[in-house]
Image (cartoon, rainbow, N blue to C red):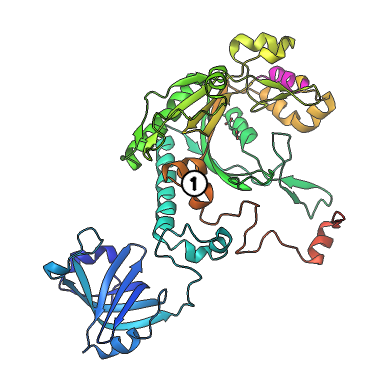
């Protein structure tokens, strides 16, 4: 018989139907056995009456999380048994027959609640069970809605989603790279991208004008509670734009997204207030200020922009390094300072961050689109001409091949979803997250590899002496 989704049973009152799914709960009352069944679309209560002998025999064996096919009739519940606030609270399945599609071991933990009391290592080890709980189903399904919304939004605005390589070249961009050894070119390595920054700029050179991508980024950063070795960005870039244009379109994206998918949430102030880096530091002591007027209100979203960041900061060794991104441009009025290497500490970058409730959720900049200006940035950072040539010659060449003025922004998608879902960390909204230490207890990674694999790559492991 055709399988009916549990959410559609309400339209089948009086009919004999088949559902497929999981045993959520079993309440055996001897003569009567009650069940809650669950599929991807919801839950429904079923009952085996004493005269349904096959169903009774199989039903008394069933345990939570067994996978079953159930035949029965959809009945309206008597008035006194109606549970108004529950999905399918006004119907009940009268079960005629049950077949077991697969048995299940006793689950490692309870999935009927939010699961916050369970150790995270255990939850991640049995993630495929953990993800069955309502909260996690909602988080992951809403994540899908958000990514779909973002895709549609940019597409409607004329942007093209373009994939960029994951196996690429190590460049000094801020954090440590994850590297991948080459078998063919022994001793050489690819790097996983910390972001598609250079590729998206090269796509501007290539004439696409409006690019976006929902893309994985990889950064090997020291263990910090809420970091993941891989995380997802909503990445975008556009040609012939100024700071205002990039801020406007991304503010529109976020406002529309919240209004459409989270209508219960309140945006504290529209348009998003703007603070200069200096103001933010003076008033709030940091560059991602939490400007919420009421920190107890779960549904209050206090967005703001932080702008006018210093381009460079002093390194411990007394040199200069970029604060955000070596590819940013100075604000037009500081271009001469950059080119003349004058008052370097005063140069303000054409750089903007979007902040939500004290978290940086996005950041971007207008880029240096001439080779001369980008070269200056590297020179100020003390790179030798050889190093510039070795690491960035393609970028400088591209900028000299007809690159339009351009700029963009990237959102940390995980953080944004975490805040919208009122979750305390990004592991709750990533299907297969790693622990805070970057381990995957389910797959057991990272792990050792076969000696032959290392031999093939020409790699010898020398562990530091303990
Ligand atoms: N690539 C930058 C980052 O990952 C974002 C941007 O400037 O577009 O932070």
Residue that appears at 56% across and 26% down: 287
Q: Is residue 207 above or below residue 2?
A: above
> Is residue 385 one of those drawn in magenta?
no
Query: Where is mark 1, residue-wise?
Result: 424
Q: Is residue 242 visible?
A: no
Instruction: Choose between 224 and 296: the one closer to the eye.
Output: 296
Give residue 249's quadrant in the image: top left
Across and down, in percent, residue 176 comes to 72, 41
Residue 265 visible in image: yes
Image side of residue 12 versus residue 351, left or right: left
Is residue 5 shown left or right of residue 278?
Answer: left
In the rendered structure, the answer to whether residue 142 lies left or right of residue 34 reads: right
Q: Quadrant of the N terminus?
A: bottom left
Where is residue 371? Give x, y as percent.
70, 20
* Crowd rating for badge 1 (residues with CA inside 10 Å; few <14, some 14–19, many 20+): few
Q: Reply yes or no: does residue 374 show up in magenta.
A: yes
Toward the left, the furthest residue is 79
Range covered by the magenta-colored residues: 370-379
């Amino acid at each position: 018989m055709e399988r009916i989704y549990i959410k559609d049973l309400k339209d089948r009152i009086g009919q004999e139907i088949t559902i497929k799914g999981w045993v959520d709960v079993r309440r055996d009352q001897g003569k009567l056995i009650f069940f809650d069944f669950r599929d991807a679309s919801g839950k429904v209560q079923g009952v085996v009456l004493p005269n349904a002998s096959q169903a009774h025999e199989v039903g008394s064996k069933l345990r939570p999380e067994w996978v079953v096919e159930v035949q029965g009739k959809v009945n309206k519940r008597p008035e006194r048994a109606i549970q108004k606030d529950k999905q399918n609270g006004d119907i009940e399945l009268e079960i005629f027959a049950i077949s077991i599609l697969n048995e299940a071991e006793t689950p490692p933990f309870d999935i009927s609640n939010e699961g916050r009391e369970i150790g995270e290592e255990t939850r991640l080890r049995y993630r495929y069970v953990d993800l069955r709980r309502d909260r996690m189903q909602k988080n992951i399904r809403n994540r899908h809605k958000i990514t779909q919304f973002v895709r549609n939004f940019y597409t409607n605005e004329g942007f093209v989603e373009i994939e960029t390589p994951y196996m690429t070249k190590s460049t000094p961009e801020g954090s440590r790279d994850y590297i991948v050894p080459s078998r063919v070119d022994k001793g050489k390595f690819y790097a996983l991208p910390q972001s598609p920054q250079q590729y998206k700029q090269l796509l501007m050179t290539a004439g696409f004008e409006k690019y976006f991508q929902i893309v994985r980024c990889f950064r090997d950063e020291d263990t910090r509670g809420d970091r993941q070795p891989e995380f997802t960005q909503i990445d975008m870039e556009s040609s012939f734009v100024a700071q205002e244009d990039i801020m406007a379109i991304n503010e529109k994206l976020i406002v529309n997204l919240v209004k459409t998918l989270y209508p219960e949430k309140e945006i504290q102030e529209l348009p998003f207030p703007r603070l200069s880096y200096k103001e933010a530091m003076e008033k709030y002591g940091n560059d991602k200020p939490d400007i919420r007027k009421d920190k107890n209100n779960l549904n209050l979203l206090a967005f703001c922009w932080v702008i006018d960041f210093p381009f460079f900061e002093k390194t411990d060794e007394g040199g200069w390094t970029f604060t955000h991104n070596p590819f940013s441009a100075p604000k037009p009025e500081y271009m001469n300072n950059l080119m003349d290497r004058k008052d370097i500490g005063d140069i303000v970058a054409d750089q903007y961050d979007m902040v939500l409730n004290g978290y940086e959720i996005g950041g971007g900049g207008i880029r240096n689109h001439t080779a001369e200006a980008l070269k200056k940035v590297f020179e100020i950072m003390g790179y030798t001409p050889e190093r510039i040539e070795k690491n960035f010659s393609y970028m400088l060449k591209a900028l000299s091949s007809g690159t339009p003025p351009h700029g963009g922004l990237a959102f940390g998608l995980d953080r944004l979803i975490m805040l919208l879902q009122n979750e305390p960390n990004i592991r709750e909204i990533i299907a297969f997250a790693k622990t805070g230490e970057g381990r995957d207890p389910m797959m057991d990674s990272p792990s050792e590899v076969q000696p032959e694999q290392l031999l093939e790559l020409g790699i010898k492991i020398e562990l530091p002496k303990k």
